Image (cartoon, rainbow, N blue to C red):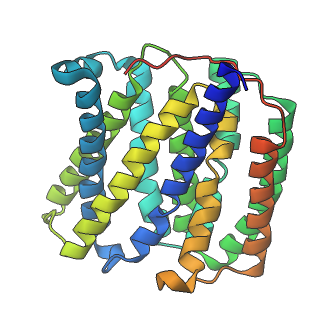
């Protein structure tokens, strides 16, 4: 295995690990106390945690010059951070309004949205194997969305799809301009999420405080997201936006499994259609990640 193949395998591992870490997000939210009453507070603490983790990463890398990264964010970084904030907020609203399976598999539409954005904005070319895998995944998603629309709330479905749109925007922004410091972009998203949610809480004459359990869970969730986004950003330069998001769909499948397994105490049983659709999506991920001989081309070199 030459250096290029080794680097590509490492990037593949990073993206798949990011998706695995994110897959525990739905489980974390299910452990909340009265989640419908503390959405904004949860987002506030989670946003601060994400920002803190990314800032620690920047300080470890750049020392006292870490603030310079924020000055170089530019329009791609602002757009990406805004998309990520939208994904943060809509995901929480969706998963507290409908089943985890419905939210997660709606989120699985991200590769298709990212593909079209990548083609339109970045002029990216999608490999035939990736197109085939996306079609297979679309079949699986369709199977599960049919079930979700019948059993979940309409608002939960809409916000789940909106979360996918937001994350697609972030994914495309990662490959927009190589000078954009990606870690600073993620940190900015965390700060913006905290500021926005704090403003909403203030307008409702409420407080950012919530049960201690929820605060701890939001910090755990923020850690999973922050570390995952670091790995996702590092691996992003080796994959087109569509393929990048297709690989991260392990989050979707894992998230449904964790809330179902009795060992975690949630036991949110998915329907047969959800199981069948999830199996199809899993096959698509395997098909694209290990079923082809990948010939990587590094498009961006990240400067964080």
- Taking the image as shown, residue 140 lies to the left or right of residue 10, namely right
Q: Quadrant of residue 131?
A: top right
Query: Residue most toward the front?
Result: 1
Name the residue rendered at 51%, 51% in the picture. 163
Specify whether 276 is left or right of 81. Answer: right
Vertical placement of residue 73 versus 148, above or below: above
Residue placed most toward the observer, 256 or 74: 256
The structure residue drawn at horizontal position 70% and vertical position 26%, both measured from the top left corner, is: 5
In front of the other: 120 or 182: 182
The quadrant of the image that shows the C terminus is: top left
Question: Percent x, y for residue 120?
Answer: 68, 23
Count of all numbered marks drawn on residues in the image: 0
Residue 66 visible? no
Identify the residue shown where x is 78% and y is 65%: 279
Compared with 203, 50 (above or below) is above
Report the residue at 67% width, 50% height from top.
109
The N terminus - image quarter = top right
| Residue 73 shows in the view | yes
Q: Could you say where residue 145 lies in the image, as x and y percent from the top left?
A: 71, 65
Q: Quadrant of residue 246?
A: top right
Determine whether 177 is above or below 173 in the image.
Answer: above
Residue 96 location, x and y as percent? Answer: 44, 71
Position of residue 74 measured from the top left corner of the image (x, y, whole percent): 36, 17
């Amino acid at each position: 295995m030459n250096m290029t193949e080794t680097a590509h395998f490492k990037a593949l591992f990073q993206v798949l690990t990011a998706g695995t870490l994110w897959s525990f997000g739905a489980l974390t939210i299910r452990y909340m106390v009265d989640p419908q009453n503390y959405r904004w507070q949860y987002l506030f603490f989670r946003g601060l945690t994400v920002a803190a983790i990314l800032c620690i990463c920047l300080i470890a890398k750049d020392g006292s010059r870490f603030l310079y990264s924020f000055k170089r964010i530019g329009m791609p970084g602002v757009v990406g951070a805004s998309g990520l904030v939208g994904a943060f907020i809509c995901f929480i609203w969706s998963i507290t309004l409908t089943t985890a399976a419905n939210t997660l598999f709606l989120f699985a539409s991200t590769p298709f949205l990212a593909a079209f954005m990548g083609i339109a904005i970045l002029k990216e070319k999608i490999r035939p194997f990736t197109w085939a895998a996306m079609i297979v995944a679309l079949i699986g998603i369709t199977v599960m969305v049919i079930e979700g629309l019948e059993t979940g709330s309409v608002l939960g479905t809409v916000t789940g799809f909106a979360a996918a749109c937001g994350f697609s925007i972030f994914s495309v922004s990662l490959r927009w301009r190589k000078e954009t410091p990606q870690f600073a972009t993620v940190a900015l998203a965390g700060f913006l999420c905290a500021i926005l949610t704090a403003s909403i809480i203030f307008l409702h004459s409420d407080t950012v405080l919530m049960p201690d359990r929820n605060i701890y869970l939001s910090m755990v969730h923020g850690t999973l997201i922050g570390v995952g986004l670091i790995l996702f950003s590092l691996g992003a330069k080796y994959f087109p936006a569509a393929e990048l998001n297709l690989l991260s769909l392990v989050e979707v499948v894992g998230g449904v499994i964790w809330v179902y397994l009795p060992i975690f105490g949630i036991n949110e049983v998915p329907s047969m259609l959800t199981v069948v659709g999830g199996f199809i999506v899993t096959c698509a991920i395997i098909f694209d990640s290990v079923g082809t001989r990948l010939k990587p081309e590094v498009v961006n070199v990240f400067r964080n």
